[in-house]
Amino acid sequence: MAFDYSKFLARFVDEAREHCATISEGLLALDSSPGDVEAINALFRSAHTIKGSARMMKVLGVSELAHRMEDVLDGARSSRIPFTRALSQLLFKGVDCLLAMLDKVNAGEQPEAPLELREALVRAAAGGEPPKPAAEPVAAAPVAAAPAGEPPKPAAPPTTLTEEQHKGALATGHTRAQEYLRVHADKLDDLIRLMGEIISEHGRFRKDVRQLKDIAADTERHLLAVAEGQGKPPGKGPGDSGARRRSAGNSTALQLSLRQTMRSVTDAVLMQEHLIGELQETSLKLRMLPLSTLFAPLRRTVWDMAQEFGKDIDFVVQGEETELDRKITERIGDPLMHMIRNALDHGLESPEVRVAAGKPPRGNITLSAFYDGGCVTIALSDDGHGLSADRIREKALAKRLYSEESLARMSRAEIYNIIFLPGFSTSPVITDVSGRGVGMDVVRRNIVEELKGTISIETKEGQGTSFLLRLPLNLAVFPLFLVSAGGLICALPATSIVEMLAIARDEIIEILDKRAIRLREQIVPLEELAAILKFTGQAPTQTGTALVAIVRDGQEKLGLLVDEILGREEMVVKPLPPHMKNLRLVTGGTIGSGNSIINVLHVPELIRQAHGLADVGRMAADKDEERGATILVVDDSVNTREIERSILEAYGYTVETAEDGQEAYDRTRSELFDLVITDVEMPRMDGFTLTESLRADPRYRNVPVVIVTSREKEEDKRRGITVGADAYIVKRAFDQSNLLDTVKSLIG
């Protein structure tokens, strides 16, 4: 029988990808322990397996590249060549190339590895110095450009196709992008077992229903007979007494039969409720995936970013076996990338600063997951310098987000939550990859508003920061607490509930004209939910006991006084229709008894409304400031000046230009601009000197300066920070949204 090539192609590609993942994991582990011979042996075995399998499948390009990598690893395990970081980066390039080639194999092609990469591996195996990695990865799969300010998305897990689909793909020469999910056999067995039990129970239930119908028919006949008997005059025959006895006997038998059947039906309903609940749980588990599917690709991404930022780190992952709905894992990839990039860029100090602070030069980032009261909590921690409440206050005041009086009244938890506002950043300088404040607001929107989760911050200045994401287990149904307030029923997401309690009304205290309660040595502010929602319905008569729902947003807590706590329900939450998207207090709706619509409340907005900070604290701009801000663009290239001018003027800014630093400096002697954008390489006076000169002028000490240049070395960026620039954009990464996001972040 002829060898069916297509039958085994999908299996080969999947296994080869798994071995690539093993090599990547091993290389990351060797970064912290380069002398681990057993780890190198494991990498060698994976490369050897890919080589052999590819040769059997006649995928010669993959086989040759794996063979070259095997030679390098053989030299490393025999100590013939040292295992250096340059060698590790070369092998990483080999893994990237293998994965790109496997995608092409999956599409029916016969790819070849680039000659440059093959020659580099041959030189490395012979003991030569591996070349420095190129700026662009070799043979990397094409990736759509990410929007400015957003980190690249982690690679999606490989799609698994069935044998028949692969045959069709080979016949047509390509595979269509489809979604498939690997399901563990045990989960499928549980679902089939449960299906059998439900079918069996449903059969018994149908018998009980038929019996109930028979009793109903007997009862109807009996009632007709009784009615006919009552129509006869009493005492008109000797049979009347016997008929009454027979009628009484029939009634007793019917009642007994009805009770027994009703008991059976009640038991059947209870059993079906149990089985349906188990069916729901088992079905939802089919879409649950271990978080290793999300966490594992991050190891390589974090390693690459650490090299980009010039920082040595240990990236520790814990709780990978924790399972979460696939729909949720797909939507938290970007928020996690934002947070990891922030931890690397802003959280962790440089090795020199860490040593000076008494810390080890190598930083630590820990990503962990665990079950938490019917939810999953994902924690991202670093041992960096932590968040500074004073610095956040200064930035918020400088950007006119809040008044000085409002900031003075805020707790530390409220101050930390300011970092989630759009456009806010504590970075000392904005670069092409971070600092424009377009990351943490995305995190909050995805986690809190779209996934109905919560995010909280734990930080200690000088020691590190932890972000805790608390997420529902799935998106099919949400756990909700139903409460009554002002005579109306509404729902609170269980992920935002800390606890519910009944307290005596005399336990409510007054602090600065605000009500509060003491909860385990903590003062929690207290507000009527009906008052926040402006409900005017009649509330129940107040008794000596008050019902309180403690909700949280990050570290902030609020006690909500409610009329009644109706219980916890698993319910489907529908999003608001487009014309109601601006209802900030409501995040969705669900259907209650009698087809009534129940509003699901948005807890972060409840807390903001309760604290009176939603609009009151924001500083209103003066009428004379409603005009477009004036920006000075400085560049010796006419084309660059006009491009930047047209972009900024299209968005309402007033723009003036200067040909070089000296002309710009002369203009600033007589005019006060709201922002200055400058190139570096210019005649007469360069951009660094111009920035330094402006910072020496008291009038321009706080005026934002943006450097837009082709210089992309780290020492140039550090010099930009030193001379006082607020943003540093590399022209290679320049685009319209990049510039506008930066300007909006600095002056609104």
Image: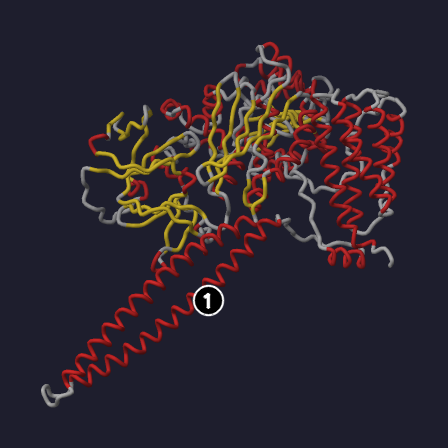
Please state if 735 lies on the left or on the right of 612 as rendered.
right
Residue located at (72% from left, 40% from top):
18
The local secondary structure at tag 1 comes to helix
Viewer can see residue 294:
yes
In the image, residue 688 sits, relative to residue 136, either above or below, namely: above
Please name whichever residue, 299 or 202, is drawn nearer the observer in this view of the structure: 202
Q: Quadrant of the N terminus?
A: bottom right
Residue 492 placement: quadrant: top left
Q: Is residue 628 visible?
A: no
Placement of 306 over or under 217, stated as above or below: above
Which of the 4 image quarters holds residue 335? top right
Q: Nearer the viewer, residue 708 or 54?
A: 54
Tell me the kind of residue under disc 1: Gly
Residue 47 point in image, percent of width and height: 80, 35
List x then y, in percent, for residue 727: 61, 25
- Taking the image as shown, residue 241 lies to the left or right of residue 281, namely left
Name the side, left or right, on which 336 lies relative to 274: right
Colour pattern of the rendering? secondary structure
Q: Quadrant of residue 361?
A: top right
Mark 1 sits on what residue? Answer: 203
Disc 1 crowd rating (10 Å Cα; few below 14, some 14-19, many 20+) is few
Query: Residue 150 at what x, y percent from top left?
Result: 62, 36
Q: Given the current orientation, which residue lies at the most extreme left position? A: 235
Choose between 504 and 198: the one closer to the eye: 198
* Depth check, front residue: 648 or 483: 483
| Residue found 17% across the figure and 83% down from its top | 242
Q: Left or right of 41: which side holds 719?
A: left
How many marks are shown on the rendered structure?
1
Residue drawn at the location 41% of the way across and 57% of the way down: 271
Q: Position of residue 135 (x, y in %)?
A: 77, 30
